[in-house]
């Protein structure tokens, strides 16, 4: 068993060996039962780890039992950034069929919703997967995304307003380059698309073109945080699992950032920008969301 006290190179070698083992046994490892496709900074990390508190849902392979911090990463990012690594590599992340029994396993890669090719790839490769999506007030999501980049010293612009102004230029032509399918990866498209990633309806339509509506479950982050047990019970039913009480440790809020005020004029501008997208989303799903209610 590898322990966290071992040197970094030893742990890295262990990761490589375990991943090689997973690839060698890939035929014994079924595809995921569900994909948690986003949205980025929308609550997907909190939802994923809350779901792991359900006894019928398993973590990814290898898990912390074999490798320290293995479960710190909830997603494989296969259908967006690592598609060139192939199906054996993808399947190497999932438990073997003999261990699953009646339990479910899935991965959460929040860039999937926004990536131009992820839905088509998933529809072709894992057509029987169920699709989970958790959405947050897009104004708050955009600001949270920007703050995350600043905390990680990955955004050079010191104001959110400057980053929003720079976004069209940063994203110009990037979606088309990604969609060309040449393996092109765009940092700007994934990480500096603060406004664009909250335009949920057109992104969701891509997924609905490849998965029927009954295989797609959309949650509101605000409702999930208000009542994690209820949301988890809804997801369990969606996955064909019975309800189960969650342990207190399963309801931890991940990726929480200190509260900061968004300039009122910026909030108004973003709210106006998102209004038609929100209306389109609600018409598409036949439901309302907390951020549009009076």
Image: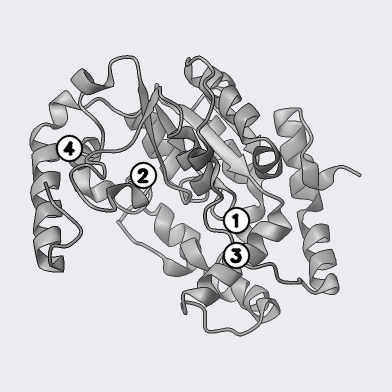
Residue 88, numbered circle:
4
Residue 25: % across, % down: 10, 31
- Which residue is the site of mark 3? 257
Tag 2, which secondary structure?
A: loop
Looking at the image, how many numbered discs can be counted on the residues? Answer: 4
Whole-number angstrom distance, CA of label 4 to CA of label 2: 13 Å
How dense is the environment of label 1, judged by Cα within 10 Å: few (below 14), some, or many (20 and up)?
many
- Which residue is the site of mark 1? 197
Whole-number angstrom distance, CA of label 3 to CA of label 1: 19 Å
Residue 136: % across, % down: 67, 48
- Of the image marks 3 and 1, the number of the one nearer the N terminus: 1
Q: Residue at x 42, y 37 (%)?
A: 120
Residue 79, numbered circle:
2
From this view, report whether residue 71 is shown above or below residue 143: above
One can see residue 194 in this view = no
Whole-number angstrom distance, CA of label 1 to CA of label 4: 30 Å
From this view, report whether residue 223 is shown above or below residue 253: above
Quadrant location of the C terminus in the rendered image: top right
**Left of 117 or right of it: where is 138?**
right
Tag 1, which secondary structure?
A: helix
- Of the image marks 4 and 3, the number of the one nearer the N terminus: 4
């Amino acid at each position: 068993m590898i322990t966290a006290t071992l040197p970094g190179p030893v742990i890295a070698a262990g990761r490589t060996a375990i991943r090689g083992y997973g690839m060698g046994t890939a035929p014994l490892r079924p595809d995921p039962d569900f994909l948690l496709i986003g949205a980025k900074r929308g609550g997907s990390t909190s939802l994923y780890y809350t779901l792991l508190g359900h006894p019928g849902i398993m973590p990814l392979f290898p898990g912390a039992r074999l490798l320290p911090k293995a479960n710190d990463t909830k997603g494989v990012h296969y259908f967006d950034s690592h598609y060139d690594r192939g199906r054996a590599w993808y399947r190497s992340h999932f438990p073997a069929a003999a261990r699953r029994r009646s339990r479910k396993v899935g991965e959460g890669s929040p860039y999937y919703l926004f990536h131009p090719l992820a839905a088509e790839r998933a529809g072709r490769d894992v057509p029987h997967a169920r699709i989970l999506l958790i959405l947050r007030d897009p104004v708050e999501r955009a600001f949270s995304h920007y703050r995350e980049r600043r905390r990680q010293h990955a955004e050079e612009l010191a104001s959110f307003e400057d980053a929003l102004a720079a976004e069209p230029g940063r994203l110009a032509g990037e979606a088309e380059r990604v969609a060309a399918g040449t393996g092109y990866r765009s940092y700007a498209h994934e990480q500096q698309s603060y406004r664009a990633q909250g335009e949920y309806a057109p992104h969701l339509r891509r997924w609905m073109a490849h998965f029927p509506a009954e295989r797609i479950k959309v949650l509101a982050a605000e409702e999930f945080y208000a009542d994690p047990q209820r949301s988890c019970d809804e997801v369990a039913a969606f996955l064909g699992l019975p309800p189960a009480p969650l342990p207190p440790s399963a309801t931890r809020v991940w990726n929480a950032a200190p509260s900061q005020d968004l300039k009122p004029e910026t909030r108004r501008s973003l709210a106006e920008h998102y209004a038609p997208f929100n209306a389109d989303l609600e018409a598409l799903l036949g439901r309302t969301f907390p951020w549009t209610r009076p």
